[in-house]
Amino acid sequence: MDRFMTRAHRPRAAIILAAGQGTRMKSPLPKVLHPVGGRAMLDHAIDAAEALGCERIVVVVGDHSPSVRAHVVKRLGEAAIAVQDPPIGTGHAVRAAEAALAGFEGDVVVTYGDVPLLTAADIEPVFGGPDAGEDGITVIGFEARDPGAYGRLVMKGDTLAAITEAKEASAEVLALTLCNSGVMAAPAALLFELLAEVRNDNAKGEYYLTDVVELARRRGAATRVVHAPEDAVMGVNAQAELAVAEALFQTVQRETFLAAGVTMSAPDTVHFSYDTQIGGGTTIEPYVVFGPGAKIAGGARIRAFSHIEGATVAAGAEVGPYARLRPGADLGENAKVGNFVEVKNVKMGAGAKANHLAYLGDGEVGAGANIGAGTIFCNYDGFFKHRTTVGEGAFIGSNSALVAPVTIGAGAMVGSGSVITKNVDAGDLALGRGEQTAKPGWARRFMDSMRAKKAAKQ
């Protein structure tokens, strides 16, 4: 392949560095597997690489985190794994991916598994366009509000002259606000040629990826900078930073949905996942949480303090307040799930209602059916799950237990307080409770007797 062909049209690969120990997180969960927006930070990085059209993605992991390796293998396969052992710098980490990219001819971008807000749109400029000029090293820089300990990007005109670490910088360089994100792109052959020349004659004895900029300049290769927002390139190394990243993610999600016509009276109290889908015209009341897999059609109403995950809500349906929709819940048009109702793996037809204090698990509720307060689908026998089917227009009286597997026919009724263990035919009334009896005067005699006993002891 012609390495000087237009960079925008060359094959792309990504190397994602995820071998860090993450000790500052002080958590048994590896740092890159901590979630932002309900998705592991590492998956955000992989998503960005896939959205860029990278035909090869290699994740550099450490032997100290087998769960990170397993996570990558499950998503991308064993071929996506490169191991850095021991961890001796970012340059060494990138070289660990060289064998996995053997034979690849194209551009490689180096990103990080702990930078969850960096999107494909932020990264795209490193590949340049039709007029991007000669091959070389491209670094993503950002204007820092507080440059602090960030490495500074020293420019000469449009050329990146040096990357200088803060502890080694002069006062003049420390005054610069253009900082290094760590994200870098170059043709694969050039990148690995330069990395082979990097030395570890520094205080830490590590191989630094940033050294390739000086090496590229020495051989006359181009060194350039493209810009990204500071928030997009923030890394997460501690729990406080994870919380900041989550807050930034939620801000973007809220702004996106508001712009799409979703009504939120208190948007700061509503929390979204990375894949939440909500149609315009939907109303969301305060303190609603969307877990992964929520799909809400336009015109639905989600009332306060509800939690929705892995569920689908059709137009005109109403959820809550204080409702929980678990994975597999599917509410049809104008269906209603009210306060303190939990629905899991149940499809509810158009206009079906469960207004309060019910558990519906594993089954189906037909259009227009009504589930009374206190009703439960008894779906688990201690070993297996079973299904409950409630037909169209059926009426289930309050405080009923439907013991699955069981079917309630269309238009049938179940009397309040019933325990139903057998199928009910369409149009029938089922009563599954003990017969009520009365004992005249018994309560009065009992109370008089007990009062007398209590008085005798005083």
Image: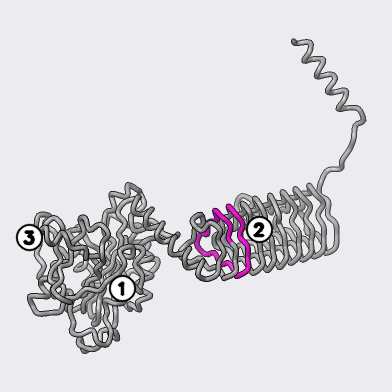
Res 201 label: 3
Nearer-the-camera pick, 2 or 421: 2
- Which three-letter amino acid code belongs to the residue tagged 2? His
Instruction: Give the residue at mark 1.
Output: 123
Residue 31 spot, x, y in % from top left? 33, 55
Instruction: Give the residue at mark 2.
Output: 386
**Mark 1, other Cα within 10 Å: few <14 / some 14–19 / many ≥20:** many
**430 w.r.t. 426: above or below:** above
Quadrant occupied by the N terminus: bottom left
Q: Quadrant of residue 77?
A: bottom left
Q: Which residues fall within the magenta stretch?
A: 284-305
Nearer-the-camera pick, 307 or 342: 307
Residue 299 spot, x, y in % from top left? 63, 68
Q: Which mark is in front, 3 or 2?
A: 3
Q: Main secondary structure of the magenta part?
A: loop
**Mark 3, other Cα within 10 Å: few <14 / some 14–19 / many ≥20:** few
Query: Residue sitting at 21 percent across and 63 percent down?
Result: 177
Label 1, secondary structure: give it. Answer: helix
Residue 304 spot, x, y in % from top left? 59, 54
Quadrant occupied by the C terminus: top right
Label 2, secondary structure: give it. Answer: loop
Which numbered disc, 3 or 2, marks the residue that appears first in the sequence?
A: 3
- Which three-letter amino acid code belongs to the residue tagged 1? Ile
